[in-house]
């Protein structure tokens, strides 16, 4: 994010941020909140007190995991069994059903349920048809971590069956489906939460409070990016590929000749024979051929099932998988503002012939216009937010850079925040080497909202750190654990008689997850409308009706 900074300048920026947080008393306030609700006694982090939930009264919520792939493995690995007890799992891929139990040899977050539950893991039921879960009345909630195009249909059927739902992001493949999900939650009076984990990130919460203090002045530009380099040849390495063969390096070596990827691409895993054999057996068991079985499950081929992020039908591209989180962050940094317009360019300029094929763009560059704080009075008060995601260069760490009239804040890789003041023209010296003056910061700001995330390493359960001190001392919590704890807390405190009723001020009458359906739909609108703008090479203006769950207007059906 900061191309020409020396290590010393980076250290100054980090120290500046810590100084601002200390001045606002954020870490101290979190500690006092934690003590007030006794989080230390019940094994909760200070984040629990900050985000407003407590330990459960009663047993953990009996939960089923639908979708045991990469993200399902992260959620299973990060969940707290004191809040959610995973009693069943479902997936049509034999490889995924095995990996959700044993864990992933390459990714520490995917610990596997055997490690979490020990001998009790043997009682976890395994299904190849998620509909079987709906027949079990003892299951109270489901976590849905399926490919994007299945989020809405599966979530809606689960809610109709009376199950509370935590669904992975992006909320749905279309905004019409998002509104259908919100309607289903209301009609069946169940909790609906969407997995934008930065809503439970203390790092982002503290950063937002610093922004609200006014130290940056008037923010006029936010630059967000998530760059990766997938241009290297896919050189076979048994240590790396063994994860697809239960950790058996010898077996991985034996099939090296049929591994398909030509380019190192995290979204292009191999199609392993175990999945092919298992899917053919399932099709035979149900009395249909493999093609019909896959079609009934929502896929055109095994390749599309395994590499769903690369297909238009099953995924939402780079904006859905990466950009949605950072635009969500930008919106909240701008006081939950909704964008005014978007335009951009998406290209498939690297992948293709003689390289791993994909239908989605491999490079995206989009520009949003957001309303400034005085936009109601002055329509020229615009904040420009740019976002880029490229696949051929990983030089810069991903993150967000906020540029204000009095300072700059860099949120880097969800691990570090750096803060700099603008150079005072009446003084000499390099502004990046100057310590900030916190005397003008407002100290009476309300607790800030946070935003969303995608992937990445996390601290181990029970040791996850949060807030500013953690940024200096090691990995911090990305919010997965807190998100699921709060979901369980909402389920346990849920009053079905109130459902989604609101008071005269438009606030829900009972506790909701921090990223309930109406909030998550805004994230989906931002990402999917950007896709439309790139596809049409046009500037698209956002309409207020799109963000209203009670109105049928959606961007994909605009005139």
Image: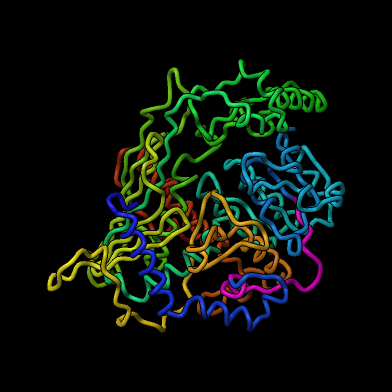
- The answer to whether residue 341 of the structure is visible from this angle is no
User: Horizontal and vertical percent for residue 375?
Assistant: 27, 68
Determine the residue located farthest toward the top in the rendered image. 257
**Range shown magenta:** 47-64
- Location of residue 326 with respect to 36 vertically, above or below: above
Determine the residue located farthest toward the front in the rendered image. 8
- The answer to whether residue 384 of the structure is visible from this angle is yes
Report the quarter where the C terminus lies. Answer: top left
User: Horizontal and vertical percent for residue 175?
Assistant: 50, 50
Nearer to us in this view, 246 or 558 = 246
Q: Is residue 161 magenta?
A: no
- Location of residue 517 with respect to 245 vertically, above or below: below
- Location of residue 247 with respect to 426 vertically, above or below: above
Count of numbered marks = 0
- Location of residue 356 with respect to 104 vertically, above or below: above
User: Horizontal and vertical percent for residue 405?
Assistant: 23, 68
Q: Is residue 60 magenta?
A: yes
Residue 316 as seen in the image, left or right of residue 440: right
Name the quadrant containing residue 538: top left
Residue found at x 66% / y 49%: 144
Nearer to us in this view, 149 or 195 = 195
Determine the residue located farthest toward the left in the rendered image. 426
Residue found at x 68% / y 18%: 254
Q: How is the image coloured?
A: rainbow
User: Horizontal and vertical percent for residue 261?
Assistant: 54, 23
């Amino acid at each position: 994010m900061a191309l020409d900074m020396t290590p010393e300048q980076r250290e100054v920026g980090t120290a500046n941020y810590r100084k601002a947080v200390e001045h606002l008393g954020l870490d101290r306030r979190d500690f006092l909140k934690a003590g007030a609700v006794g989080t230390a006694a019940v094994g909760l982090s200070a984040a629990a007190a900050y985000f407003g939930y407590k330990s459960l009264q009663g047993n953990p919520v009996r939960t089923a995991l639908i979708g045991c792939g990469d993200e399902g493995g992260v959620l299973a690995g990060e969940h707290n069994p004191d809040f959610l007890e995973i009693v069943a799992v479902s997936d049509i891929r034999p490889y995924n059903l095995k990996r959700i139990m044993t864990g992933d040899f390459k990714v520490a977050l995917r610990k596997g349920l055997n490690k979490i539950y020990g001998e009790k893991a043997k009682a976890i039921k395994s299904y190849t048809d998620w509909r079987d879960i709906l027949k079990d009345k003892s299951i109270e909630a489901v976590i849905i971590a399926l490919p994007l195009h299945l989020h809405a249909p599966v979530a809606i059927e689960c809610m109709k069956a009376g199950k509370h739902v935590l669904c992975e992001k992006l909320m749905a493949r279309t905004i019409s489906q998002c509104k259908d999900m919100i309607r289903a939650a209301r009609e069946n009076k169940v909790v609906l939460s969407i997995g934008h984990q930065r809503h439970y990130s203390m790092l982002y919460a503290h950063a937002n409070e610093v922004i609200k203090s006014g130290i940056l002045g008037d923010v006029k530009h936010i630059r967000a990016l998530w760059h990766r380099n997938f241009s290297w040849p896919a050189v076979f390495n048994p240590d790396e590929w063994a994860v697809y063969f239960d950790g058996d390096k010898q077996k991985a070596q034996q099939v090296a000749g049929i591994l398909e990827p030509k380019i190192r691409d995290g979204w292009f895993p191999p199609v392993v024979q175990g999945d092919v054999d298992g899917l053919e057996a399932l099709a035979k068991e149900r009395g249909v051929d493999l093609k019909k079985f896959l079609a009934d499950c929502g896929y055109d081929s095994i390749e599309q099932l395994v590499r769903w992020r690369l297909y238009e039908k099953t995924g939402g591209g780079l904006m859905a998988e990466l950009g949605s989180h950072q635009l969500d962050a930008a919106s909240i940094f701008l006081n939950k503002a909704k964008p005014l317009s978007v335009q951009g360019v998406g290209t498939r300029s690297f992948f293709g012939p003689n390289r791993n094929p994909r239908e989605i763009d491999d490079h995206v560059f989009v520009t949003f216009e957001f309303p400034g704080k005085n936009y109601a009075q002055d329509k020229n008060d615009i904040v420009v937010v740019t976002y880029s995601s490229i696949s051929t260069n990983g030089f810069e760490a991903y993150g967000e850079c906020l540029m204000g009239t009095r300072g700059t804040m860099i949120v880097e890789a969800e691990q570090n925040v750096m803060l700099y003041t603008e150079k005072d023209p009446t003084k000499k010296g390099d502004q990046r080497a100057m310590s900030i003056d916190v005397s003008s910061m407002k100290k009476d700001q309300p607790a800030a909202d946070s935003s969303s995330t995608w992937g990445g390493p996390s601290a181990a359960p029970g040791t996850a750190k949060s807030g500013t001190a953690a940024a200096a001392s090691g990995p911090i919590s990305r919010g997965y654990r807190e998100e699921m704890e709060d979901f369980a807390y909402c389920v346990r405190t849920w009053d079905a008689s109130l459902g989604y009723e609101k008071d005269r001020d438009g606030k829900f009458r009972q506790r909701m997850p921090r990223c309930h359906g109406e909030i998550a739909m805004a994230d989906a609108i931002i990402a999917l409308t950007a896709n439309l703008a790139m596809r049409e090479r046009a500037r698209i203006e956002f309409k207020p009706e799109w963000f209203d769950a009670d109105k049928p207007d959606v961007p994909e059906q605009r005139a």
